[in-house]
Amino acid sequence: MDYLPAGARPLRKGPAEWFTGDVTMEPLVDAAEPSRLRASLVSFAPGARTHWHTHPLGQAIHVLSGRGRAQRAGGPVLRIGPGDTVWFAPHERHWHGADPDSAMSHLAIQEAQDGHSVTWAEPVGAQDYAG
């Protein structure tokens, strides 16, 4: 058993190679093999968002606070809020982030395949973000 009390996990600023805007990431679970579980608390400032990306085994996000947006490639922009959960299928190209006028925090849960849990791509353009 591992126990990490509140405040024991380091907060990280979301790198510009992965995010647009101000994003803070708090790793919650990075389980050792044979587990593949990865989970983080991700907090987005108003207007902040991920770049386009995929996950080899899919991803679930669960909104804890604020208002946000999510989109899979070719689909409509979804408006998401507290209590909403979105599942992105394996290798489904997508993005998610905060509304322009609201911060948003969500849990991000995914599994790693061969130690790899995400493939990052280009920033989300203004037209996609606007929906």
Image (cartoon, rainbow, N blue to C red):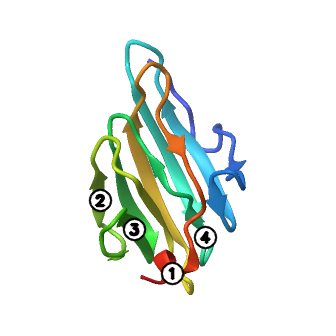
**Which residue is disc 4 drawn over?**
48
Which label sits in the foreground, 3 or 2? 3
Mark 4 vs mark 3, CA separation in Å: 12 Å
Residue 54 point in image, percent of width and height: 43, 46
Front residue (pair 13, 59): 59
Q: Decide: few, some or many residues near mark 1? Use Cα within 10 Å; few <14, some 14-19, many ≥20.
A: few
**Which residue is disc 2 drawn over?**
86
Q: Kindly identify which numbered label has been placed on residue 32.
A: none
**Which residue is disc 3 drawn over?**
70
Residue 121 point in image, percent of width and height: 56, 50
* Residue located 30% across and 69% down the image: 75
Asked whether the residues under the numbered discs 3 and 1 touch, taking CB atoms below 8 Å apart as contact, a structural biologist would say no
* Residue located 51% across and 40% down the image: 119
Q: Decide: few, some or many residues near mark 2? Use Cα within 10 Å; few <14, some 14-19, many ≥20.
A: some
Mark toward the start of the polypeptide (3 vs 1): 3
Question: Considering the image in quadrants, where does the N terminus appear?
Answer: top left
Query: What amino acid is at disc 3?
Result: Ala
Asked whether the residues under the numbered discs 4 and 3 touch, taking CB atoms below 8 Å apart as contact, a structural biologist would say no
